[in-house]
């Protein structure tokens, strides 16, 4: 007999009941195993219950309505993550809400009371609308009014930002192809336009945003409305990173 066969037989014989082995020994062993498994299951259930209670407290503290909680649940399911992560981690929030919003055509003149307004309300209640200057931007939805940008190399500034779009003002001398010899030609509505900007001393960003609309509110300014870029190209300017 090979050594390995001898070893396997000895293991088998060790677990076979013999006349000298009391049945109660095996009963105690089974009960012990089942008790251990039961303790693990109970511990896991208690942890889940504690997480649900903590999440419920967070929603109450942030004054999240039932409809807004349902929105968090929906975008969490869409992203395949726990609702608690959507409500506590801005990276997860941005990813999950982007998946939800991409299925809705963005308006170009206000967001009304639809899904874009709902996401904006949840963002504000969760405290994700105020970002420190050293935080990396994950989407152009995190831009703020007054941000200096360049549209196809021409300087401008952000006028408005919401979950559906952002608008940029540029000087009237740089029109969108209407005036003679324009400094800026953007092409037709829907064209992807290169918009760049620096976010403090943290990084420079290069984005490709769809031109949704263009207006001339006065004789001095052209208002350009862009869709959001959910994955802007980031060129880091500092050693530390957002974690």
Image: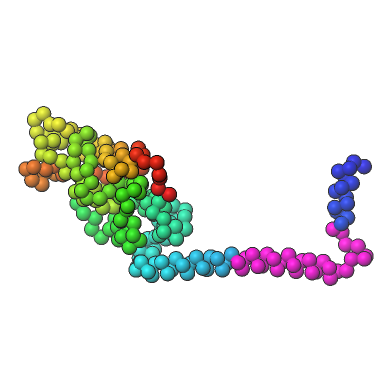
Q: Position of residue 157 (x, y in %)?
A: 19, 44
- Decide if residue 86 is on the left or right side of residue 33: left
**Is residue 105 shown to the viewer in this render?**
no
Within the image, what quadrant is residue 127 found in? bottom left
Q: How many marks?
A: 0
Residue for point 35% across, 61% down = 126
Residue placed most toward the observer, 189 or 36: 36
Q: Position of residue 131 (x, y in %)?
A: 32, 53
- Decide if residue 108 is on the left or right side of residue 75: left
Residue for point 87% across, 45% down = 5
Colouring rule applied to residues: rainbow
Q: Position of residue 185 (x, y in %)?
A: 18, 33
Q: Quadrant of the N terminus?
A: top right
Residue placed most toward the observer, 61 or 225: 61
Q: Position of residue 148 (x, y in %)?
A: 22, 43
- Decide if residue 172 is on the left or right side of residue 225: left
Question: Which residue appears farthest toward the top when viewing the image?
Answer: 181
Q: Magenta stretch: dominant SS?
A: helix
User: Would residue 27 be counted in the magenta stretch?
Assistant: yes
Residue for point 78% across, 66% down = 29
Within the image, what quadrant is residue 72 found in? bottom left
User: Which range is magenta?
Assistant: 15-43
User: Would residue 157 be counted in the magenta stretch?
Assistant: no
Residue for point 38% across, 64% down = 69
């Amino acid at each position: 007999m090979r050594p390995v066969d001898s070893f396997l037989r000895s293991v088998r014989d060790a677990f076979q009941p013999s006349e000298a082995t009391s049945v109660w020994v095996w009963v105690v062993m089974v009960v012990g195993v089942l008790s251990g498994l039961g303790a693990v299951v109970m511990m896991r259930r208690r942890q889940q219950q504690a997480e649900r209670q903590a999440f419920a407290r967070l929603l109450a503290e942030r004054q999240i309505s039932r409809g807004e909680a349902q929105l968090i649940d929906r975008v969490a399911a869409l992203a395949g993550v726990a609702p608690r992560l959507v409500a506590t981690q801005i990276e997860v929030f941005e990813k999950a809400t982007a998946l939800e919003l991409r299925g809705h055509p963005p308006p170009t003149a206000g967001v009304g009371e639809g899904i874009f307004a709902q996401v904006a309300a949840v963002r504000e209640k969760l405290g994700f609308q105020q970002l420190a200057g050293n935080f990396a931007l994950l989407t152009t939805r995190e831009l703020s009014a007054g941000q200096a940008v360049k549209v196809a190399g021409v300087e401008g500034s952000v006028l408005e930002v919401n979950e559906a779009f952002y608008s940029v003002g540029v000087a009237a001398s740089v029109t969108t192809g209407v005036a003679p010899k324009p400094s800026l030609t953007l092409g037709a509505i829907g064209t992807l336009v290169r918009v760049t900007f620096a976010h403090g001393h943290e990084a420079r960003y290069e984005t490709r945003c769809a031109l949704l609309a263009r207006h001339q509110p006065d004789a001095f300014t052209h208002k350009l409305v862009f869709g959001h870029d959910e994955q802007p190209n980031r060129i880091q300017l500092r050693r530390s990173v957002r974690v």
